[in-house]
Image: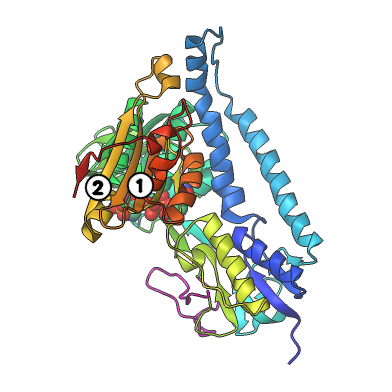
Amino acid sequence: MAFDYDLFVIGGGSGGVRAARVAAAEGAKVAIAEESRLGGTCVIRGCVPKKLMVFASSYREEFADARSYGWDVMAGDFDWSKFSRHLNTELDRLEGVYRSLLDGSKVEIFDSRAVLDDAHTVRLSDGTTKTAKHILIATGGHPVRPDMPNAHLGMVSDDIFHMTDLPKSILIVGGGYIACEFSCILNGLGVEVTQVYRGAQILRGFDEEARGLISDMMREQGVNLHVGTNIVEMGPAGAGHGADGAAMGAPAGEVVAERSDVVGGPVRVKQTNGTEAVYDAVLFATGRAPNTANMGLEEAGVEIGRRGEIVVDDYSQTGVPSIYAIGDVTNRVNLTPVAIREGMAFVETVFKGNPTPVDHHLIPSAVFTQPEFGTIGLSEEEARDQEPIEVYCTSFRPMQTAFAGRPDRVLMKLVVSKATRRVLGCHIVAPAAGEMIQLAGIAVKMGATKEDFDRTVAVHPTMSEELVTMKSPVRSA
Ligand code: NDP
């Protein structure tokens, strides 16, 4: 049977675009459909704009530090609308880059939603169908709000980039990557930030000592962080909603107003600990879910897992042989570089005849809190459950900020196997920890031992030199 394309990719984010381009470079006839903007979550409403906001938010303290270094500077005010205009221009530019890369690779672009019709057919929004020998689903995920009355009054991370003004105060709900990053960003931009997390400590799953230092530093910098609490009620803080909090708004399911009317509008919130307060805005950073709804997946025989994810094997193949899926829609490791690797491995497997599973082991990552957190491998807690370990750890005030009189501390930590001496985990809380862990991650991925780290001469004076100069374990377990 002759197909319209060798490959039809649904979803123009990092993973889908890379797979489309690389497959086309192999001589495949490729099309891609994107219902929103090319670039996807990472470029349009995730990593890229978020990191630019991290940069924007870091200047406040840098101006203050500069004064300690002899510079006669004043920070002045932050102009959100100026930054936001510049940000949007940059995102338009990047979207254009993605489009021209696809054009240059001779990938046909459909600016349209696409759903499955059957194992070899996709249907576009205008009703037309296209057939393909292989279909790759790379539709990503979306932020989810908790299931509670009036939850629509709260923003999700997508909305942050569309704010016309910065709120004076914000309540951020959640303790994961997004909650902690935006707490630090908005705090740095001068917003009064309150963060509530239902668990005992933010950043669940990461090394406890690192989590402890990050939460201490966030509080030190002014984030009003409350753990062990959640929100139980929320409603518009307008007329009829008295200070006693008697009327918190509509019951579940009742629509109070369209989203665009309420984003940034004052919201009255009640917490499980009894606290009640009004915030200019609420941000739900309560997790993300795969984009699999109403896509014809189950009808085409594709298995959907418990969390709405597409179930795939090690080669990103679904139970339907012609249909593959990569990236957040598969809910494996939800990071851009992982989606890109999954896309490359898919092309290697399907178009280069070289079956390539994706290696999801020992992936370095960073949380762009302030200070940043760079991490790879096992936390101390995970490692000691696995085998006897030694822990090498140091926490200190780094030269640059100590000189400026800031109390900031950093942390350098290695978790080492007693039996093999291999570094099982490396955890860094420090400015630019994301940059550091990228490099330390190579050594850990290569299986470096503590002695390999020790044999490496320190680069002085740096913060990361501590990683190669820690002589004695602080504890064994
Ligand atoms: P996470 O899953 O990391 O965090 C969700 C948070 O919300 C958790 O603290 C969770 O609590 C809490 N939560 C969930 N449901 C509720 C609820 N009903 N009420 C109150 N709290 C709730 O999701 P994020 O949205 O922060 O990030 C999604 C993914 O995106 C990350 O896992 C990561 O893979 C990726 N990402 C990566 C970044 C990076 O690399 N720097 C940056 C941003 C995102 P609990 O812990 O108790 O479950």
Residue 320 in picture, x, y percent from top left? 54, 85
| In the rendered image, the vertical position of residue 415 relative to residue 5, given as above or below | above
Name above or below for residue 110 compared with residue 315. above
Q: Which residues are magenta?
A: 293-315
Residue under label 2: 390
Which is more foreground, mark 2 or mark 1? 1
Q: Is residue 341 above or below residue 257?
A: below
Q: Secondary structure at mark 2?
A: strand
* The furthest residue to the bottom: 1
Residue wearing tag 1: 450
Left or right of 98? Residue 271 is left
Q: How far from the left and from the top, in percent, is residue 438?
A: 50, 46
Residue 304, percent from left and from top: 44, 76
Residue 163 seen anywhere in this rendered image of the structure:
no
Magenta stretch contains residue 305: yes
Camera-nearest residue between 227 and 59: 59
Q: Please tell me which residue lies in front, 468 or 346.
A: 468
Q: Is mark 2 within 8 Å of ligand 1?
A: no
Residue at position x 69%, y 81% from top? Answer: 132
The quarter in which the N terminus is drawn is: bottom right
Badges 2 and 1: C-beta atoms under 8 Å apart? Answer: yes
Provide the major secondary structure of the magenta segment.
loop
